[in-house]
Amino acid sequence: MAECVGGSSHTMDKSITLPPDQIFRNLENAKRFAIDIGGSLTKLAYYSTVQHKVAKVRSFDHTAKEAPSDKLYEISMQEEVTARLHFIKFENAYIETCLDFIKDHLVNTETKVIKATGGGLIVCCPLHGRGCNFVLKNIPHEAFVYARHADSEFRFQTTNPDIFPYLLVNIGSGVSIVKVESEDKFERIGGSSIGGGTFWGLGALLTKTKRFDELLQLASKGQHTNVDMLVKDIYGGSYGCLGLTGDLIASSFGKSATADTDFCKEDMAKSLLHMISNDIGQLACLYAKLHGLSRVYFGGFFIRGHPVTMHTITYSINFFTKGEVQALFLRHEGYLGAIGAFLKGAEEDNPNQYSWGENYAGSSGLMSVSPEMNPLQRARSGTFDMLEMDRLERQLVNLPLLQDPSSYIPDTMDLTEDAPAREYWLYCFEEALDGVVKRAVASQPDPQEAATRAEKFCQKYRHKLQTLRHQPL
Amino acid sequence: MAECVGGSSHTMDKSITLPPDQIFRNLENAKRFAIDIGGSLTKLAYYSTVQHKVAKVRSFDHTAKLYEISMQEEVTARLHFIKFENAYIETCLDFIKDHLVNTETKVIKATGGGAHKFKELIEKKLGLKVDKEDEMTCLIKGCNFVLKNIPHEAFVYARHADSEFRFQTTNPDIFPYLLVNIGSGVSIVKVESEDKFERIGGSSIGGGTFWGLGALLTKTKRFDELLQLASKGQHTNVDMLVKDIYGGSYGCLGLTGDLIASSFGKSATADTDFCKEDMAKSLLHMISNDIGQLACLYAKLHGLSRVYFGGFFIRGHPVTMHTITYSINFFTKGEVQALFLRHEGYLGAIGAFLKGAEEDNPNQYSWGENYAGSSGLMSVSPEMNPLQRARSGTFDMLEMDRLERQLVNLPLLQDPSSYIPDTMDLTEDAPAREYWLYCFEEALDGVVKRAVASQPDPQEAATRAEKFCQKYRHKLQTLRHQPFAYGSLTVRSLLDTREHCLNEFNFPDPYSKIKQRENDSALKYFQKAVKALEQLSWEDRQFALVRGVLAGNVFDWGAKAVSDVLESDPEFGFEEAKRQLEVRPWLVDCFDRWLERLKGPPHKCALFFVDNSGVDIILGVMPFVRELLSRGTEVVLASNSGPALNDVTNGELQILTERIAAMDPVIRSGLKEDRLTLVQSGSSSPCLDLSRLDKVLAMVVRERQTDLVIIEGMGRAIHTNYHAMLSCESLKMAVLKNSWLADRLGGKLFSVVFKYEVPAGKC
């Protein structure tokens, strides 16, 4: 069940494309490090503080000796320190470079310990549970349903403040099925040895393809019906009396038992993928039913951003539960272990007592997972991925007057699903950018210095807008 | 889901080793054919009738002899099931065609994945129309049928235990259960009643996956060979274990280090080549564990505790039975047991047959496995005797006789579901098995002699007797090597097998003449014996009555020690027998409590399972019955429906009782007033299975509000039912006429067992 992502280091550029100080930000004040080292990806978490300016308003004092101003209040710029969580994901190949960089820049920390996890879900199922609880509570659109051929690949779920109980199915090398009942109560209720490692291991033996990603690539091009025995292969059609359609797989790899032909790699990989996804889907459904759970979150490297696996798992869950149970995936699934490990180490700071917000400026965001869509972009941005979360001043809860908090959606329009509206608004915000920059500069005491910063802001926001045009999610 | 067994035809000899007429028996009268064609095995079923001789007794009007014995021809129904490799199908169809004479059959019911493939061949060869039946329906029907009619059908598999198989006792209440059929894929079916079943789940990871992936990984195309490879492999070389990841167990989640974390996990990253055996083993574990887990989850979700596994993936393969059993134990922590079926391979054929035979109402009868005509279960340890397995895999037969009577539980069993008739399981008790097999072999010559003597034409009879002798000796040899061939091996099954074999060669009642002689002579002493008893005081009489039953029971041809004496000294008398009896205190002695009980109010009704003819029934049992009747207790005398050794049969007992009634007023009025009733047990065995008794008996027992059960004799009270718990008072009486058994029970030859039991809460 160790987490082992395909050894992508073979093909990927070893040089760090982003300057390290843009990745490992705020290292000076970093403390409480946690690291989650998987088979190919390392996830680093740390807690830091950010100093930034805030505009404060203060009412004028009537006792002041100066001539009373005609202004209602005074604005002053103050430095404020807020807490921020940094999560960075990078390939294991960079681990040495990264550690060197951290070492050089770690100045103020008094940290003596680094929480480490890895080896996948078995070890860290409590940690994953913890991490999972954290993102579900703090990131509004964390969970999504995957629908390959729908208008939008992802359908995000609205936050339900009542996240418990749920089932977490982590598909690493093997599968762990964890029932999460509360912040601290988890139980591994089941598992299976047929997981990502089986796909990879059997796939490697069958296709001589040693890389996980390539195996998935093969699978997405294959035809499982060439290898699998379908119901119609046995009965000549559907098996009506048992309610089995003709296209249902009766026996995975059933055709290779007797046929003397050679099977192509793609077909075998696809058959293997179906076999494993369906099996996990069925197990997850049975455990969900047995424990009366309707929300099932899937994670682990088998799932992580792979549309083929998300699709087959979703299909399988729909098939077995006839829609009663939904397969849910998480945007920050890869970080769960690191977040959990970090939370474990940071207990004295009580991170769970605060509300946290995703910092859009510092986070990389979810990438489109359709491999055919933009494989290059995917490969590149897979190199470094960041999530930053700000501690919010105040703890945030539901308005108690909401009629149904679980179905409440604040936004009137979902631009992810509404393409013309998206077009319009993205254009609108881009148009408005110049005006925003102008006003921002004007708000500052030193226009020269402000202009430089404004330029950086402008670049970053424009880049985000462009990103959102391609990846509205 | 389709049945596809590895194409074993490659290695096996194509010639039929048994003469076809020994396989396709009773074809002349065969009707209602059904066929189940799988990937490599064909199972044929037909219904036929067997004509065989039965000994009938008929009362004379006024002659010297008590009754006349006549041999009559009787026709009984028998079901034949034959399993053979697809390679033989043409030869077999030809043979059937040639021998099918009397049938009016127009249709053959067919099921199985291969049914459409051979449709034309069958229609052409047999001239019968092939009528396809639904596979799953047939499977379930067949499963219900064997579970109901074959007592030791289901077993638990334990590879390293003393006996490979632990058979389950019959539970008349077979529903609901889960059937997991592992063919190419897996079907998980919940069976709720005879006609109500639902496929609640399934999986595409089944036998076809093992075969298909196995073939791709190892280049081994044969299913059996893949299993062979798997049994030699080390899965730990291919699988990633918990300890491979964590260096040991993962305590906090309760995962041991040896648990498989990821099937084939090591082959993902290692660059080494993996050996075929290891990959096959890993694959087997992966599939078995997965099916095991799914089965457990479905069982839990539907609240079912009985899970039967079948399909070609399981069929007789110890490796798969072992891994499935292991997986079920692991996932349910023992709450659910993996059960397998002895006749699993026949289910489809049985079901298809039943579908076609609905107008004969086969489900309204009770059926019994005919040990003489059935091949029995083979040892599945491949290392044990691979040759034997390969050979006898060629043709396998199951024959079932329609029983005259419908059999049910004795309503007075305390817990029918936990009732086990047999006291000793010879499958698990090796020394006992050795002893009894030896004992039965030793006795064989005597049995043959008596069998011949019972026939009118000794010359002709000798030939048949020789055949009987060969067959039974062969069965004994088979049982020595495969004690589990017909379920748990017991003294009862050895005796029953002998009776089946005797019947097979038309020796329906070898003891008929001996019984007749003994009944005649004992009857002469009846009045004298009764008079002597009447002169005793009440208390002395009670003791004398018990001693009489015990002494009478010494007259038993079934026990070797006694039959020696009987044969050497025909004058061995009743009084002599009494002197031979152990003096009190007996080995098991509840007489004082019994006497105390008799001082109380009379029983409402006593059910008496009687044993031997002659002195036993006439001088031992009848006076005892007379006393019960005098006390105001109604008596139901239960005797065998058919002959077994010198046990008195219902037919004989009817005549005997009438004769006694003629000279004894108590018995006479008892009969007249219907306070003495004779019923048949439904059995033709020297032993007694209280879970398979005549339906009429059960009805009478209920109507009369029976509150006392008396069981007499070694076969019924010691070999069987010694530990049986009844819901009313019971009396078990026997004399140990076998020194080995006496030794086992801590006594000696002619030790007495007098066991009087009152169920808890009724003292």
Image: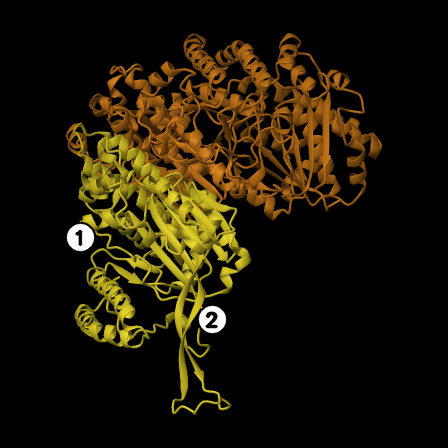
Chain colours: A yellow, B orange
Chain to which mark 2 belongs: A
Q: Which mark is residue B409?
A: none
Say what amino acid the circle numbered 2 marks.
Arg
Quarter of the image with the N terminus of chain A is top left
Marks 1,2: beta carbons within 8 A:
no
Q: Residues within 10 Å of mark 2 (few under 14, many from 20)?
A: few
Q: Which mark is residue A373?
A: 1
Vertical comparison of B304 with B690: above or below: below
Foreground residue, B400 or A266?
A: A266
Which image quadrant for residue B188?
top left
SS type, badge 2: loop
Vertical comparison of A313 with B320: above or below: below
Residue B757 visible somewhere in the drawing: yes
Quarter of the image with the C terminus of chain A is bottom left
Which image quadrant for residue B537?
top right
Chain to which mark 1 belongs: A
Foreground residue, A227 or B37?
A: A227
Vertical comparison of A374 with B213: above or below: below
Q: Position of residue B667 (x, y in %)?
A: 67, 36
Say what amino acid the circle numbered 1 marks.
Met
A379 relative to B738 in the view: left or right: left
Residue under label 2, please give it.
A394
Q: Residues within 10 Å of mark 1 (few under 14, many from 20)?
A: few
Foreground residue, B746 or B404?
A: B746
SS type, badge 1: loop
Q: Position of residue B345 (x, y in %)?
A: 35, 31
A23 relative to B620 in the view: left or right: left
Q: Position of residue B357 (x, y in %)?
A: 32, 39
Which image quadrant for residue A122?
top left
How far apart, in angstroms, are the residues tagged by discs 1 and 2? 41 Å
